[in-house]
Every structure is written in C-alpha cells, then in structure tokens.
Image: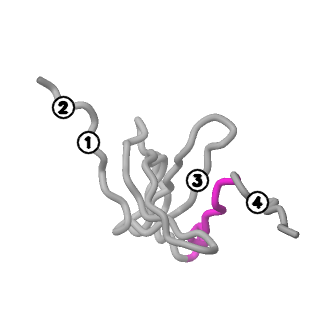
Amino acid sequence: MARRRRDRGLPPVATSLPPEARGGPAVDVTPPLPVRAWVQTRVALIRVEGRALCETPDAVLVEWGSGQAATDAWVWRSGVRHRRTALAD
C-alpha cells in the first residue's frame, strides 16, 4: 500500500546563517533590491529569486515568495547576485 507524503507541496525549510557568521552590524537595504541567491535547505541547495532586505559585510538577508508563503534566510554574500529589472527602452 502506498504511503502518503505529508510534506508534499510545502516549501523547503531554509537553513539561515547563525548570528556569529553574519559579521558586522546589519544595515537595511532601502528599497529592497531584487536578487538571485543560493539557499541551503536540509535536503538540497536551491536558487531563488527574491529581494535583499538587510546586509552585513559577509551576509545578506534574502526574502522570497509572497504573502504568508514568504520565506527568508541569511546567506553568504558571495551566493547573491543582483537581478536585472525591466530594461529601459
């Protein structure tokens, strides 16, 4: 008999950097910048499109998703790239 997966359809839980690894004081990014970032979960490394909310010299707080499904995690700065918005004609 087949088992039903209870976690099917749930977003992966991201592993955030601990405060000791983030380095320096956190500064808000105003307005939040669109970014692509590599995020570590318990089972895989995923690439997300989100926005940078806060930063330190070593890490960036990235949020992705929307509404109640929004998730955030602190990731290494080197794993974050600015995303291009619509190009001006």
Q: Amino acid at mark 3?
A: Asp
Q: Amino acid at mark 4?
A: Asp
- Circle 4 SS class: loop
Q: Amino acid at mark 2?
A: Leu
Distance in Å between CA atoms under marks 1 and 4: 33 Å
User: Of the residues tagged 1 and 4, which is closer to the observer?
Assistant: 4
Q: On residue 15, which mark appears?
A: none
**The C terminus sits in image quarter:** top left
Question: Mark 2 or 4 closer to N-term?
Answer: 4
Is label 2 in contact with label 1 (beta carbons under 8 Å)? yes
Query: Does the magenta-highlighted stretch encompass residue 36?
Result: no
Q: Which residue in the protein does label 2 denote?
A: 87
Residue 20: give x, y in percent of width and height: 57, 76
User: Of the residues tagged 4 and 3, which is closer to the observer?
Assistant: 4
The reply, left or right, for residue 5 in relation to residue 81 is: right
Q: Which residue in the protein does label 3 denote?
A: 72
- Circle 1 SS class: loop
Q: Nearer the viewer, residue 42 or 79?
A: 42
Question: Mark 2 or 3 closer to N-term?
Answer: 3
What is the span of residues highlighted in magenta in the rendered image? 10-20
Q: Which residue in the protein does label 4 denote?
A: 7
Is label 2 in contact with label 4 (beta carbons under 8 Å)? no
The reply, left or right, for residue 54 in relation to residue 3 is: left
User: Of the residues tagged 2 and 3, which is closer to the observer?
Assistant: 2
Quadrant for residue 55, please give it: bottom left
10 Å crowding of disc 2: few (<14), some (14-19), many (20+): few
Distance in Å between CA atoms under marks 2 and 4: 39 Å
Question: Mark 4 or 3 closer to N-term?
Answer: 4
The structure residue drawn at horizontal position 41% and vertical position 59%, both measured from the top left corner, is: 37
Question: Mark 1 or 4 closer to N-term?
Answer: 4
Q: Nearer the viewer, residue 5 or 32?
A: 5
Distance in Å between CA atoms under marks 1 and 3: 20 Å
